Image (cartoon, helix red, strand yellow):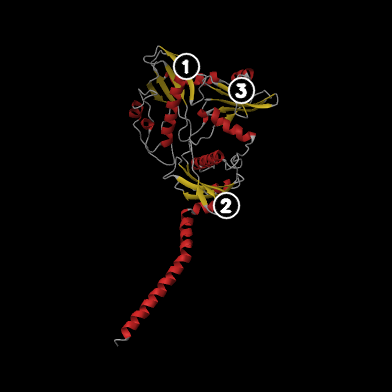
Amino acid sequence: MKHEAPKCIVVLTVICLVVAALLAGVNHITAPIIEKSAVSGAQASLYAVLPNAAGFEEETLEGEVPGTVTGVFRDTGGSGYAVTLSAVSSYSATPMTFTLGVGTDGKITGVEMTNYAESKDFGDYPDTYIGQDSALGGVDVHAGVTYSSKAFRGAVEDAFAVLVELGGVAQGNKTDEQIIEELKGELLPGALNQAGAPKLKEMTLPDPSVQQALQAENDVGYFYVIEENGETLIVVVSTTGGAVCVDLEKIDVTEQHAALVQRAMEWSNTDAVHEKNKTTAARALPEGAQLTPVSASGQFGAVSSIFAVSGGENAAYVMVCSPYGYRTPMKLIFVLDSTGAISGLRVSGELIQDSDYYSNYTLDESAYIAGIIGLTRETADQDVTLISGATMTAGGVWTAIQDVFAAFDNLTAE
């Protein structure tokens, strides 16, 4: 028995050494696989949009980068890029996050949603982007999820802007129709609703050179597409006296086409808008105050009429604003004193519009308005306009305040 013990120890030692050697061998074989699997898990969405990628290296982004772009990853095999994105819409409980794959040909290879907490189902909307280049000619916002799809599209546009800046992909070519659609919001921002869509209605004009004549539904201006000597030109006229002409390269050619701009101003029935607004504006002032329409040539926002005031205590101007709330334009009448401070505010109609997302909502409107009285450009803060449960209404009020101050600056600069 004394001789058996050393033998057992030797056998056990040999077994341990063999097992250790086997484990070391297995670890040598499996460690790279485990490591690759862990990396793949962390980068699963990247491989989902570029499935044939050899691997990914994160790009260093310099300069001003859109807040929606959280990362850009280059396939080391050269097939393209994966861009991680985060966007917020009016119905987001948390940010909408997704990964976009873009090939070296500049076309979208895939979309992988990594978080979607919107209140309405997106369906297959993200898949409609596959195959598109930066022009995004085949997709638009989606009915039923307008705000979510707008935020999604904006993030995709930001991703392309970053990739083009990096030199990774080429800029896609936009059609004339796309450029004209973009110009509606860029040149007449006051006509945009809360989803960022221009709300315009068609007009009929006898001039055969006019390809398109549109009036803002909230009466802030007019948008014309005109053929002049074989060239397509865009002329925008605001109801507050602004006028601009651009070509399809988005170059300002107002001075070169002064006669055309003058014709467009004559087509625009701004007098009727001011006459309608004058009655509304007068209600914000003491009886007997006199209102005279004035122009602010650089103003294309939500201000539809500006009146100089005489005989109104502490009132130099009254401005009628028609920003969009939840569904339709609001009507806000601001009174400004000679320094540009808000000395009065009246709401025509309902401030809080009906919504599918809240009911029986009450707001102390007098207290809310009192918080806005006295604001100047320097003291204005968006927090003052916040209304819990009515985000879009609050957004409309803030837009109006910014546009009112911009109009006042324009008036005093002329």
The local secondary structure at tag 3 comes to loop
Q: Earlier in the sequence, mark 2 or mark 1?
A: 2
The local secondary structure at tag 2 comes to loop
Mark 3 to mark 1: distance in Å? 23 Å
Kind of residue at badge 3: Val
Kind of residue at badge 1: Ala
Residue 253's tag is 3
Q: Earlier in the sequence, mark 3 or mark 1?
A: 3
**Quarter occupied by residue 389:** top left
Residue 398 screen position, x and y as percent: 42, 30
Residue 290 to residue 372: above or below: above
Q: Nearer the viewer, mark 2 or mark 3?
A: 2
Q: Residues within 10 Å of mark 3 (few under 14, many from 20)?
A: some
Kind of residue at badge 2: Gly
Q: Nearer the viewer, residue 389 or 169?
A: 169
Q: Nearer the viewer, residue 77 or 148?
A: 77
Mark 2 to mark 3: distance in Å? 46 Å
Q: Nearer the viewer, mark 2 or mark 1?
A: 2
Residue 381 to residue 281: above or below: below
The local secondary structure at tag 1 comes to helix
Residue drawn 57% across the image and 33% down it: 182
Residue 43 to residue 414: above or below: below
**Residue 321 visible, this orientation:** yes
The N terminus sits in image quarter: bottom left
**Badge 2 is on which residue?**
77
Q: Nearer the viewer, residue 331 or 65?
A: 65
Residue 278 screen position, x and y as percent: 47, 18
**Quarter occupied by residue 251:** top right
**Badge 1 is on which residue?**
413
Mark 2 to mark 1: distance in Å? 57 Å
